[in-house]
Image (cartoon, rainbow, N blue to C red):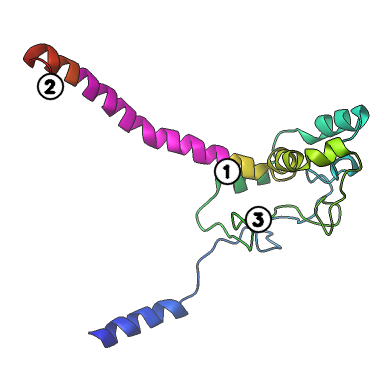
Amino acid sequence: MLRRSCSRFAGRLSAPRFAVSMPGQKQAFGFGEVDPKNAPGMLPVQKKPPENVQDTVNYIVKGFSFPTRKEIIEGLGYPGQKHSAGGISTHGRLYYGPRRYDYGRPVMPKGWFANFFYGFWEFGHLMFVADRWQAIRWLRHFVMIGLCYLPFWIRMQWDLKELEQYKERFGPV
């Protein structure tokens, strides 16, 4: 019996792994070009936190745009979606290259105000400018939690009404 189990599991380890490779995939994660010219978060004004009003206006105008088709597909996910060696979520970057702000050593801001709030800027920059697909993934996560919770909440409301009817009919519980 043990011999059969071992041989069955050994066969599974040698089977090829099934992961989707999208047409035109050139990297371990995502599909398409790695460093396209129109990639979000690659402009010079987006390489560090804005430190004056003009940089802030340029950053906001050019940074906050509608996600691309590629970002929406990767954010929603698909069966067999590949993953890579990421730090927190094991998802790689869709766009990466020498023009990206965190390629190599990031340029730190010069002023104390921008330095003090650098962590907040970086979170907002990653979620809403450079890696917008991560924000789509978070949104998907919270929406699906709500949809899965909804039947339980509806059932709870029905049970509360039934409890009130029970109390009216038979007295306190």
Q: Are marks 1 and 2 in contact (CB under 8 Å)?
A: no
* Mark 3 Cα shell of 10 Å, populated few (<14), some (14-19), many (≥20): many
- The answer to which of marks 1 and 2 sits earlier in the sequence is 1
- The answer to which of marks 3 and 1 sits earlier in the sequence is 3
Q: CA distance from mark 1 to mark 2?
A: 45 Å
**Residue displayed at 78% across by 43% down:** 40
Which residue was labeled with disc 1?
A: 137
Examine the structure image and report whether residue 160 is included in the region drawn in magenta.
yes
- Tag in front: 3 or 1: 1
The answer to whether residue 110 is left or right of residue 149 is right
Q: What's the magenta bit mostly, secondary-structure-wise?
A: helix
Q: Position of residue 46 (x, y in %)?
A: 84, 41
Q: Nearer the viewer, residue 160 or 41?
A: 160
The answer to whether residue 108 is left or right of residue 132 is right
Q: Are marks 3 and 1 in contact (CB under 8 Å)?
A: no
Q: Amino acid at mark 2?
A: Val
Q: Nearer the viewer, residue 171 or 34?
A: 171
Q: Which mark is residue 30?
A: 3
Q: Amino acid at mark 3?
A: Gly
Q: CA distance from mark 3 to mark 2?
A: 58 Å
Instruction: Tell me the magenta residue range.
Output: 138-161
**Residue displayed at 32% across by 31% down:** 151
Q: Are marks 3 and 2 in contact (CB under 8 Å)?
A: no
Secondary structure found at label 2: loop
Q: Position of residue 140 (x, y in %)?
A: 53, 39
Q: Which mark is residue 173?
A: 2
**Residue displayed at 58% across by 60% down:** 82
Q: Position of residue 27 (x, y in %)?
A: 70, 63
Q: Amino acid at mark 1?
A: Arg
Looking at the picture, does residue 164 appear above or below residue 70? above
